[in-house]
Image (tube, helix red, strand yellow):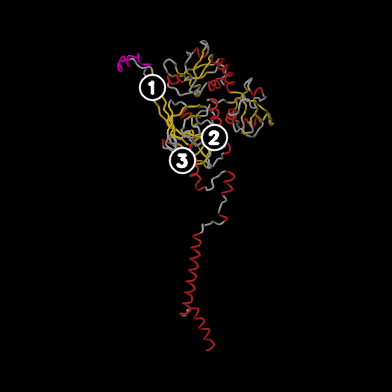
Amino acid sequence: MQRNVPNRKYMACRARPNALVWVIALLFFMAGMVTACSKAEEQAEKPKEAPPSSQPSQAPVAEKTGAPADWRTAIEQVAEKAIPVVVHIEVTEYQEVANPMLPFENDPLFRQFFGNRKQPRKFKREMKGIGSGIIMDTSGHILTNNHVAGGASKINVLLSDGSQYPAKLVGADPKTDLAVIKISPKNSLPYATFGDSDKVKVGQWVVAIGQPLGLNQTVTQGIISAKHRTSIMNPNSYEDFLQTDAPINPGNSGGPLLNLQGQVIGINSAIMSQSGGSEGIGFSIPSNMALYVAKQLLAHGKVVRGWLGVSVQDLTPDLAKSFGTKDLNGALIADVVKGGPADKDGLKRGDIIMEFGGKKIHDAETLRNEVALTPLGQETKVTVVRNGKQVELKVKIESLSDETKLLSAAVKERLGATVRPVSKKEAEKLGLRPQQGVAVASVDAKGPLGRVGFEVGDIILQINRRVIGGVADFDALVSTLGPRQKIMLLAVDHRTGNKGYLQVTTR
């Protein structure tokens, strides 16, 4: 029995400690708490560090690509950098429009209601609009859209600091919907940095800044949804839009689309919408195209474009197979203008242009844009597929004005007339937009136009419902017409301002 007593006490001590044991344990516990609290205070004073595996290495990326060091504040950084170089543009346009009542002034019923008062031949109207722009240099040149400032009679620019300046138009290019205006600031201005739009990737984050609905300095964000969008506004214009879902609304036109480095990669120009507001489909002119056009406008007041002298079309699977290629990329030469650059340097009908100047050609529109942006007189390398084999040639680019001379002869042959641009005075008198249609310069009374009643000064707006954007458009369309072909023209009588359709048969 005695031998078992110590063993029972030990078991008892473990199960139920006596008072001395409790005191000792409590002292050790309190000492441990004090040590833990002091360590916690030391940790609180030190900045928190994430585990190495969860901490992305941002600095090297920023050094190599110019990406923001902290993606959480990337859009804030872009906005802070870009807002000072974005301006608000207010335009006023004065137009003279034909009196719609003028044709009825001699009608007895009209006189019964309105009396014998002489009707004015035209009315003056004032139109106001808003848009955005981008400061290009310290001296006050601003890049914007042609549809914002191109036809304006009065332009006023509001800077981000609240100062206002009148502006004058330096030059405009309806074909790309771009214009350059100029203010005379008191001090040196901040200006935008332009990025390389050829390096833009689908899915990359972008920021739009502008004045939607007149709300100054509005910043929105989204991504690049697609590239190389064409035939959005006018099939006869030079289009290569970046598509974005960054919210763009009326008033954003002419403002920048920026990457997360704060570089301008596009000029916001149009939206696709059924409501009139942003529905997630906006279009921006690529910065590379915009800069080329802006430099041309600054140097010459107009854009001088290159000309290759070919008619091209997109490839279909059947066409690609018949011409010896499986690739649907490229532009198929349907015709070569006799005496043009392509004819002189060996390009032939049936060639498929795959590369031009080292750049891949996706379709006919891509080729048209690349040729137009090529400096005149430059020898350019062209890669074509001919009879299933790849051939490399060099072509010397000529001026688009040379094409106009050749095609003008075709117009005279087909329609028995020559045309010229519509003057600003004529456009105001007849209520037309700038660069809309062509005016008849001369007409053979026995030719196709003369036989249906066309006179010198009449305006042709459309051929077969295709809008005419100028002499080059008109000449190019007429050159595609065959002999004895019936066409429908929308025309304006230069005397009365009345519009109407006329059917004409070519020679």
Indicate whether 332 appears above or below 220: above
Which residue was labeled with disc 2?
287
| Crowd rating for badge 2 (residues with CA inside 10 Å; few <14, some 14–19, many 20+) | many
Indicate whether 62 appears above or below 275: below
Q: Are marks 3 and 2 in contact (CB under 8 Å)?
A: no
Q: Residue furthest front?
A: 186
The amino acid type found where label 3 is placed reads Val
The amino acid type found where label 2 is placed reads Ser
The amino acid type found where label 1 is placed reads Lys
Instruction: Give the magenta-colored segment's residue range.
Output: 102-117
Callout 3: helix, strand or loop? strand
| Viewer-closest of 419 and 1 | 419
Q: Are marks 3 and 1 in contact (CB under 8 Å)?
A: no
Which residue was labeled with disc 3?
219
Q: Residue at x 52, y 48 (%)?
A: 70
Q: Which mark is residue 124?
A: 1
User: Where's residue 193, x and y in %?
Assistant: 53, 37
| Viewer-closest of 177 and 275 | 177
Q: Is residue 155 magenta?
A: no
The C terminus, quarter of image: top right
User: Where's residue 400, x and y in %?
Assistant: 58, 23
Q: Is residue 111 magenta?
A: yes
Looking at marks 3 and 1 on the same chain, the residue that comes earlier in the sequence is marked by 1
| Viewer-closest of 351 and 211 | 211
Looking at marks 3 and 2 on the same chain, the residue that comes earlier in the sequence is marked by 3
Looking at marks 2 and 1 on the same chain, the residue that comes earlier in the sequence is marked by 1
